[in-house]
Image (spheres, helix red, strand yellow):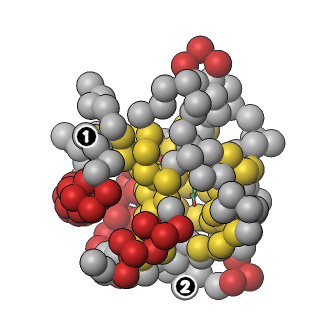
Amino acid sequence: MSDWLNDFEKQGWAELRDFITPEAALGIRTEIEEIQIQNGFKPASIGKHEQKVVDSSQRGDFISWIDSQTAPIRTRSYLDKMEELKSELNRHFYLGIRDYECHYAHYPPGTFYKKHVDRHRNGSPRRVSTVLYLNPHWEPTDGGELVIYNADQSSFRIEPRLGTLAIFLSELEHEVLVTGRDRMSITGWMLNEIIL
Ligand code: OGA
Ligand code: MN
């Protein structure tokens, strides 16, 4: 079993550095910039269905959902990799993952996402969260780390470096610290239901 699978089994999360090559990651970043110009990103909301609200005191990112049918080529190769990852998770942990949904995310300087869980209590199909980071030359002084909390409130930080994938159980508490620079990613969720 590979190292990250061991980490994931023990801790419920893992950091995979160089999950994709710098070229592939920069390619996706270019695709994002193109989409930002053409369609714009919208402020992300919190809550579910009719209770959805934009609240920048909780989260300040801007997002654009990815449609696998129309996604540009570099993004599509990433989706193919996530398909493999989905099979690997099911093979090792019997998670019953059936689908994957994801969006591009942009955190402008000064934004953050306060501590939360991705799996809403009343029947969320989200089992595993994934974040692919697309930021070249990230420095510790740039902030913007993902902090994942264990049940005892001990925590681990992941820097949003180019090509790193963070993967964690969607029920674990986590937050995004204030970023000092534009912070780009693809955030996604492995689901135990098929979305239409
Ligand atoms: C989210 C989230 C983490 C990150 O979008 O739900 O927690 O590192 N993102 O961007
Ligand atoms: Mn989250």
**Along the line of sight, which residue is nearer the eye, 166 or 5?**
5
Q: Which residue lies furthest to the right in this view?
A: 57
Residue 50 coordinates in the image, percent (x, y): 59, 14
Q: In this view, does 151 lie to the left or right of 72?
A: right
Q: Position of 94 compared to 137: left or right?
A: left
Residue at position x 58%, y 30% from top? 121
The part of the image, by quadrant, that contains residue 46 is: top right
Image marks 2 and 1: residues in contact by CB distance under 8 Å:
no
Rendered residue at 36%/40% (across/down): 191
Kindly state the secondary structure of the residue where label 2 is placed. loop
Q: Which amino acid does label 2 sit on?
A: His
Q: Can residue 100 be seen?
A: no
Q: Name which residue lies at 28% across and 43% down.
A: 96
Would you say 192 lies left or right of 133 here?
A: left
The amino acid sitting under disc 1 is Arg
The quadrant the N terminus occupies is bottom left
Front of the two marks 2 and 1? 1
Q: Quadrant of the C terminus?
A: top left
According to the picture, the residue beneath numbered tag 1 turns out to be 98
**Whole-percent x, y for residue 5 in the image:** 36, 72
Residue 54 vertical position relative to residue 188 in the rendered view, above or below: above
For marks 2 and 1 on the same chain, the one whose residue lies earlier in the sequence: 1
Relative to 53, say whether 167 is above or below.
below
Provide residue 112's location: percent of width, then percent of height.
72, 55
Q: Answer few, some or many: residues within 10 Å of disc 2's Cα (few below 14, many 20 plus, some between 14 and 19).
A: few
Q: Name the residue under label 2.
A: 137
Q: Nearer the viewer, residue 43 or 123?
A: 123
Disc 1 is placed on an element classified as loop
Query: In the drawing, what numbered circle is on residue 159?
Result: none
